[in-house]
Amino acid sequence: MIRFRPHHFLCTYNFRGKGYSPSFITNYQQVIQRLEKEPIEIVNSSDSICAPCPHRRGGMCQSEARIRTLDRRHEEAFGFGKGPIFWKEARAKIEKHFSIALMRKTCDGCSWLKICEEINENA
Ligand code: SF4
């Protein structure tokens, strides 16, 4: 089953082929291809997106405290629940609540925020 930390739902919504490394991007694209058919388990540790990330340290991120804050904010803002959840349902929750102003709050502290703002400003 695909595994997502809560903040990775919005990351996936915003994914446009950029990432930390070529292997990270390739893995991300492979996970996205599975989203149509497979449910997503919601986890509080390294997930299917994190697998090849250079910042992963075993089951955690090297910035685990900051990432847990991101996860909590995203869970509260979009209400993904305990899971499992299909991408179609998760995407609908994002579309129901999404605004750039909300993203600036939920994603505060993420180094990719500027890029995600540009994606949505130009959408
Ligand atoms: S700003 Fe960061 S946490 Fe928020 S959606 Fe973009 S990559 Fe994900």
Image (cartoon, grey):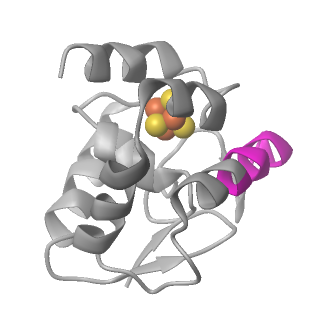
Per the rendered image, the range of residues in magenta is 61-72
Question: In the rendered image, which quarter contains the N terminus?
Answer: bottom left
Q: Nearer the viewer, residue 10 or 56?
A: 10
- Place of residue 29 in the rendered image (x, y in percent of width and height, measured from the top left): 21, 50
- Place of residue 40 in the rendered image (x, y in percent of width and height, measured from the top left): 39, 78
Q: Is residue 95 left or right of residue 100?
A: left
Q: Residue furthest front?
A: 96
Question: In the rendered image, which quarter contains the C terminus?
Answer: top left
Name which residue lies at 62% across and 38% down.
106
Q: Is residue 94 left or right of residue 15?
A: right
- Place of residue 37 in the rendered image (x, y in percent of width and height, measured from the top left): 15, 81
Question: Does 35 appear above or below 108?
Answer: below
Name which residue lies at 40% across and 41% down.
98
Q: Nearer the viewer, residue 21 or 82?
A: 82
Q: Is residue 62 left or right of residue 79?
A: right
| Number of numbered discs on residues | 0
Residue 62 magenta: yes
Q: Residue furthest right?
A: 65
Residue 36 magenta: no
Looking at the rendering, which quadrant does residue 71 occupy? bottom right
Name which residue lies at 28% across and 20% down.
119
Name which residue lies at 30% across and 27% down.
18
Overall secondary structure of the magenta stretch?
helix
Looking at the rendering, which quadrant does residue 31 occupy? bottom left
- Place of residue 72 in the rendered image (x, y in percent of width and height, measured from the top left): 72, 56
